[in-house]
Amino acid sequence: MSTSQTINGNQHYLPASDDAEFGGVLASLLAGLAYKQLGHFVFFQTVTAGGAAYMSPGYGAGAADAASHVAPCAGRIVGTYARCRVAPTGQGLAFEVRKNGSIVIGGEIAIGETSATSATAVSFSAGDTFYAQTSSGHTGGDDASVVVAWAPA
Amino acid sequence: MSTAITLNGTGYTIPEMGETGWRTTLNAYLAALATARGGSLVWGISTGVTTAARYAPPGYGAASSSEIQISAPATGTLRGLYVKCRTAAVGDSVVVTVRKAGAATALTCTVAASGTTASDTTNTVSVTAGDALSVSVTGGASFSSGAVDFLISLTLTPS
């Protein structure tokens, strides 16, 4: 009789050891464990209206320059989630995440909305740096955050 | 020859394939491994705990009267709420509650008056990636001071 495990939303069956598919199923299960999301970077900016600005790693009003998170190991970004307490008006609140200075993820919280998601996957190496910026031109957009979820490679 | 593995303080003796019970033991170990893996979420309040509800910023900063929300970075289960403040709460206890989508969840704990730590290792909360998460901190009616450098951490175990 097989037993099962659910990993990353997928159910894996572990057959008896003398079943032909045993090795493949066990390998799939272990691979699922290896790719579970483990880390995230948080960027925050209490006030985003008034001009393009750098976000604070962790929490803060914003940064004067490109203050970065640094990757502690090689990995892969698996999702990016932006949110603000006060919906932007006038125009959307655009955000971008840069890896080693280059834009790798972009998105926008639309007028009247308070969240946005990007599914863009980005691979990175240990020591790569990430910072985030928000756009100008909108009003509102207070307490904006960008959460970058990643998994080790 | 069997193999002994310890995970989160629990020992698992994995028998050789073909030995009685090998698959059951391996499955139990893998289930524990899936639960053990996860990332931490941290909030911190430098100052600003009052008898009214205040909200902790992600990372560390002054408490806010506005609800500060961040998005859950993965679908999974929140568990293991632990809090620690550098200076004890004076006058009354302080209640810490994890919130999802602007509403209180079952994940909560209370730092007693004169205490500096608390935890909830019993309750869990299911979340979907992108859910709005926040943490409220509220002093009891007689709370007067203290609860400074108030750090809150929990684990998000992806499903």
Image (tube, coloured by chain):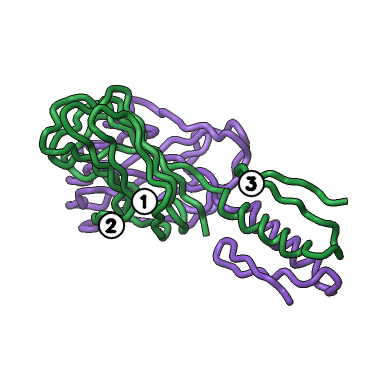
Q: Is residue B27 left or right of residue B90?
A: right
Q: Is residue B135 left or right of residue A35?
A: left
**A113 and A98: which one is in front?**
A113
The residue pinned by badge 2 equals B101
The residue pinned by badge 3 equals B10
Please say if B100 is above or below A130: below
For mark 2, name the chain: B
Q: Is residue A141 left or right of residue A125?
A: left
Chain identifier of the purple chain: A
Name which quarter of the figure residue A144 lies in. top left
Amino acid on which disc 1 is placed: Ser
Q: Secondary structure at mark 3?
A: strand
The residue pinned by badge 1 equals B71
For mark 3, name the chain: B
Tint applied to chain B in the drawing: green
Amino acid on which disc 2 is placed: Ala
> At 73% from the left edge and 59% from the top edge, which residue is drawn?
B26
- Eye-nearest disc, 2 or 3: 3
For mark 1, name the chain: B
Disc 2 packing (10 Å; few <14; some 14–19; many ≥20): few
Q: Position of residue B91 (x, y in %)?
A: 16, 29
Disc 1 packing (10 Å; few <14; some 14–19; many ≥20): many
Residue at mark 2 to residue at mark 3: CA–CA distance: 35 Å
**Which mark sits nearer the N-terminus, 1 or 3?**
3
Residue at mark 2 to residue at mark 1: CA–CA distance: 10 Å
